[in-house]
Image: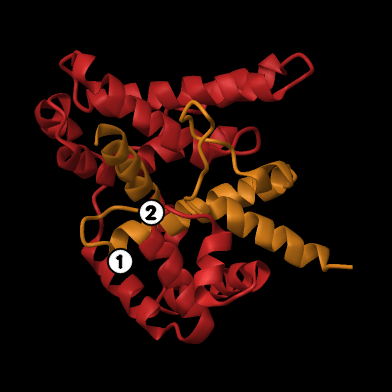
Chain colours: A orange, B red
Amino acid sequence: MGDPGKDRETLIERVVSAFRARDPHGAVRTSPAWHDLDESGRVEAFDLAEKMRMMEAAIDGEGLSTTARAVLRRISSSSS
Amino acid sequence: MDDLDVHLSAIVVGDAAAFGRWLACAEAPVRASLRSFAAKVDVEAVLQEALLRTWQVAPNHKPDGRENSLLRLSKRIAKNHAIDETRRARSTPMEEESLERAVSDADVGTAATPDPFLRRWIEHCRALLAGKPAEALTARLENAGADADETLAEHLGMRLNTFLQNVTRARKQLAECLAKRKIDLETEMR
C-alpha cells in the first residue's frame, strides 16, 4: 500500500503545475488531482503555487511565470 | 503602485507582447484575489481561464478613468468565474454565506514589480540545485505548463511519482536556501 503522505504530496505537486487540459470547447479544465485533495490540501496547493509563480517570474527574463506563459501560448495558438 | 493601463492601448489592438507585459505584473494580484476560493475551486484553472477571457474582452473594454481598470476588470472576471465554478461543482444547495464571505475577500492585491534583489537570490539558490531535483524543476519551468507531468517524466526517463517527488525536493531545497538568507516568500508577496 502507498504512503498516504507521499500520495498527498504528489497530488499537491500536480495541482501546483501550470499544466491544465482543455475541454472540447477549449475551456481550461480543473486538474483531476485537485478533486482527489481535501480542502486543506487544496489550500496548501494554492499557497505553494503562489510562491512558485513568484519565483518563476523573478528568474524569468521577461518576468513571466509558467502560468503567464501557458496563457500566452494559448493566445498565440488561437490566433494562428 | 504602477498603473498597468499603460499597456492598454496596445492590448486592445491585439498586441500579445503588450498583454505579456501586463500579465507579468497583473497575474499575482488576480491570483491573490482568488485566495478565498482556494478550497472550493482549482484556482490555477480559474485564473488561466480568467486571463484568457480578459484578453478576449479587452478590445471592448472602456477605461473608467481610474488606474488599473483592466486589472480590476480581470479580477471581476476571475471572481465571477470562481463563483460559477463553485456553484457548478455542488450538487447540494450552495452555502451562500461562505460564498459571500469569499466574494467579499476577493478584492485584494495590487500590481507588483519584481524585486531585483529577490531575483538574484532565487537564481543563486536555483543554481545550487543538483541532480534529479534540478532536472525535474528545470523541466517544469522550461515547459511552462505546455505538457502534462506524465510527458515531462517520460522525457526525463523517470516514473511519474519519482518526477513529482523530485519537483517537491527541488522546491523544498529552494525554500531552505532562501530561508538561510532570511528571505521569506510570504513577506515578499504581501
Q: Dividing the picture into quarters, in which one does residue B154 lie?
A: bottom right
Query: From the viewer's perspective, is residue B71 above or below residue A61?
Result: above
Give the residue displayed 46% in from the left and 77% down from the top: B135
Q: Which chain is mark 1 on? A: B
Does residue B1 appear anywhere in the picture? no
Determine which of the numbered discs, if any, sits on residue A66 in the image: 2
Q: Quadrant of residue A9?
A: bottom right
Q: Amino acid at mark 2?
A: Thr
- Give the residue displayed 35% in from the left and 71% down from the top: B122
Residue B11 on image: x %, y %: 16, 30
Please give the chain letter of the residue carrying mark 2. A
Against B94, residue B8 (above or below) is below
Q: Which mark is residue B118?
A: 1
Residue A25 vertical placement versus B143 (above, below):
above
Instruction: Name the residue type under label 1.
Output: Leu
Q: Secondary structure at mark 2?
A: helix
Question: Are the numbered discs 1 and 2 placed on the same chain, yes or no?
Answer: no
Q: Position of residue B186 (x, y in %)?
A: 46, 56
Q: In the displayed structure, does residue B90 sit left or right of residue A44?
A: right
Q: Is residue A56 above or below residue B120?
A: above
Rendering quarter of residue B22:
top left
Tell me the crowding category of disc 1: few under 14, some 14 to 19, or many 20 or more residues within 10 angstroms, Cα based: some
B33 and A9: which one is in front?
A: A9
The residue shown at (46%, 56%) is A51
Q: Is residue B47 left or right of residue A60?
A: right
Q: Secondary structure at mark 1?
A: helix
In the rendered structure, the answer to whether residue A50 lies left or right of residue A8 reads left
How many numbered callouts? 2
Instruction: Classify residue B22 as left or right of residue B130.
Output: left
On-image quarter of the N terminus of chain B: top left
Distance from disc 1 to disc 2, alpha carbons, whole Å, reads 18 Å
